[in-house]
Image: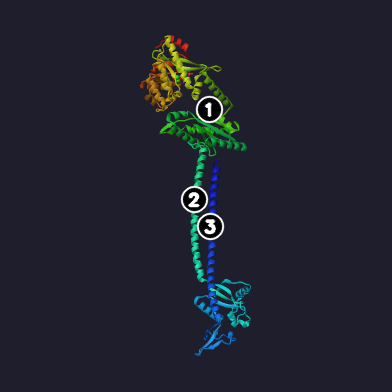
Amino acid sequence: MDGKSTDRREKQDLRRLGLQVLLAVSVWTLLLVGLLAWTLDNVNEEMMELARLEAVANFNKDQAFRAWATGHGGVYVPETPRTPASPYLSHIPERDLVTPSGRKLTLMNPAYMVRQLMEDYDELYGVKGRITSLKPLNPNNRPDAWETAALKAFEKGTKEVFEITEIEGRPFLRLIRPMVTTEGCLKCHSHQGYEVGDIRGGVGVSVPLDKYLSVASERKRNLWIILLVVWIVGLGFIWLGASRSRQRLLERIDYEAHIWNQANFDALTGLANRTLFMDRLDRALTYAKRDEHLLALLYIDLDRFKDVNDTRGHARGDELLQQVAQRLQQCVRDMDTVSRLGGDEFTVILPVIREKSSAAMVARNILEELSRPFQLGGRENYLTASIGITVYPDDGADSGELLRKADTAMYQAKAGGRNSFRYFSVEMTQQAELRVRLESELRQALEREEFELHYQPVHRLSDSQLVGAEALIRWHAPERGLVPPDEFIPLAEESGLILPIGKWVIRQAFADMARLDKIGTRLSELAVNISTTQFREKTFAAQLIEFLGKHPHMKQRLCIEITERVFMDEHSEPVLQLEMLHQEGVRISIDDFGTGYSALGYLKRFPVDNIKIDRSFVSDVNKDGEDASLCEAIISIAHHLGMKVVAEGIEEREQWDFLRQKGCDFAQGYYMGKPMPVNVFIDYMKSHKVA
Ligand code: C2E
Ligand code: CA
Ligand code: CA
């Protein structure tokens, strides 16, 4: 998995949420549209039913009236233009009567009366009525097509027919029910062959719909408004739910990205971590194999980074790593991957290179970039790195092999003087193996008592007297013979073996001094080399002081030689330890002076007794004017600060003379004597004037 596929999943999740919201909105809208349609239909039906009931009520009233009139065989009314003698009733003998007072009355048959009533009703209330029959007496009562169909249906048993129609451009509900022949009907209709119970016609009522429609449309409008509001509220809820889900989804995506970053990136520098690095390397190798191109891997280790951590603190160390990460990234292309494997180890994958030497260009670029000073807490820090390079396919075909070999090459670069890069080679592997063997042999050297101390005399320049000696370790390795300290001390420092070895040196030196004392060849001062690594042990000074307490013969006679590296940080413990030791009468010598750090301020602030001018300045003191001035300057500064100066590596008479002339205090070198085993040194002491 990588960043892109999580990206894709995020987009999918968001799209799915979008679809869900769309679905919810659609369902909600459909539901409300359905509900609206149903309720509107209901309103219509309800209005129709009410209109029908009104029509039925009218019909009933007509019926009651007609029944009453029929029951009484009609009604006599004065003969007026509106109520003339009916020509259809001329067959009835009593159609016209004259009242005793001479008023003429004529018989109104129920159908006529009802029709007139209907006309009045129409005029007053807009409700129209009509009596019709398939065999009407009055041609006005002849049915229209709809009525004819209804009347025919009545004969088959239908009890009611109604429809919505338009009359004179206005909407009406028209209802028609059958008219059943009763006893009273026969008075007028018996000549037509009617019998009681016959269905001989129908009574129609037309109710105007305007008022119903206007009520319905008002109710519909209200319904529209209510449902619209409900719809909007629903949409609001959907929106709320959706935005919450979206929020949760985004939080989850955020969280997943965070987890992904934690799993794949280095928290301190933001670079790819080991997991992502291996993943990328595997992938790059797959492409390199498929497309048959070269790939390079750079393994970068900062030189002496531990010193920065130890002297400036871990926070500054972290800051430095961050700055290094930034610079590394500036040195590579976008397609290259810079990773931090842990500690001060970095890698760069160059997934595609044109030729093997391209990797060297990048490596050189990185070394150059790192050589610019780093700003740490207002101070400048200098840093170098060692780089090992492997190339696919020359050095291997799988990521593990390329990484292992790049690591070996890096070690080789370190061993070759640091601040450099190396390509992997076969000899390199052999050398790496040699190193591993040497280390394991070194581990056994102490038990097997393969170490020995040699002593190199130190003389006073003013009177040539022997004033002391420096103890120098020798290793007689069984198969290798004599291994020089320059070859095994750095290895012992890296592996931590220097701690037990350093203790052995002090114990042995104290024992040898006791032996010298015993045979009457007393030496006033003995110098012992102490590695910076030994100072990192917080209890170093306390242990040495305790040891001195048990060996009173060494009181005021021990001098420790340390390098300037110990002074890199004024707040660090080594300095406190130096103060403790100095108070106990242990003298402090700065070894290899002039080769380490340029700052001299520490000389003033710390308990330093001697300065040892490095052999490299002394050897050319008579040939090189600069070296001569340097030696003079060192002597002058040291004396100003109340320190003594020891010149190392004096091999010739001229060097001795020059330094003596310049006021240097002591001298050490092959010219007087090489480092020698204690027995030889005893003889040496006997043949020289001892101060
Ligand atoms: P160093 O402390 O600077 O010791 C002086 C080195 O210069 C010694 O090398 C010595 O043999 C050599 N030397 C002295 N005079 C002359 C001269 O006139 N010409 C030449 N060419 N060389 C001269 P050595 O004994 O091989 O030691 C090398 C380094 O190993 C020492 O340098 C010191 O840093 C380290 N070392 C030696 N013994 C010990 C030890 O017991 N403990 C620790 N921590 N380091 C040690
Ligand atoms: Ca030394
Ligand atoms: Ca030295």
* Amino acid type of the residue that numbered disc 2 sits on in the rendered structure: Ser
Cβ of disc 1 within 8 Å of ligand 1?
A: no
Q: Earlier in the sequence, mark 2 or mark 3?
A: 3
How busy is the neighbourhood of tag 2: few (under 14 within 10 Å), some, or many (20 plus)? some
In front: label 1 or label 3: 3
Position in image of residue 312 (x %, y %): 42, 30
Q: Name the image quarter holding residue 44.
A: bottom right
Position in image of residue 467 (x %, y %): 40, 14
Q: Distance between the Cα atoms at labels 1 and 3?
A: 73 Å
Q: Which residue is mark 1?
A: 411
How busy is the neighbourhood of tag 1: few (under 14 within 10 Å), some, or many (20 plus)? many
Assign the C terminus to one quadrant of the image: top left
Asked if the residue under mark 3 is in contact with the one under mark 2, i.e. CB atoms within 8 Å, the reply is no
Q: Which residue does the image show at 50% across and 38% down from the upper left?
A: 262
Cβ of disc 3 within 8 Å of ligand 1?
A: no
Q: Which residue is mark 3?
A: 29
Q: Which residue is mark 2?
A: 243
Can residue 204 be seen here? The reply is yes
Q: Name the image quarter holding residue 8.
A: top right
Q: Nearer the viewer, residue 237 or 302?
A: 237
Q: Name the image quarter holding residue 562.
A: top left
Q: Secondary structure at mark 2?
A: helix
Q: Quadrant of ligand 2?
A: top left
Q: Distance between the Cα atoms at labels 2 and 1?
A: 57 Å
* Amino acid type of the residue that numbered disc 1 sits on in the rendered structure: Tyr
Q: Nearer the viewer, residue 624 or 434?
A: 434
Can residue 659 be seen here? The reply is no
Q: Earlier in the sequence, mark 1 or mark 3?
A: 3
* Amino acid type of the residue that numbered disc 3 sits on in the rendered structure: Thr
Q: Which residue does the image show at 53% across and 59% down from the upper left?
A: 32
Q: Is residue 658 left or right of residue 198?
A: left
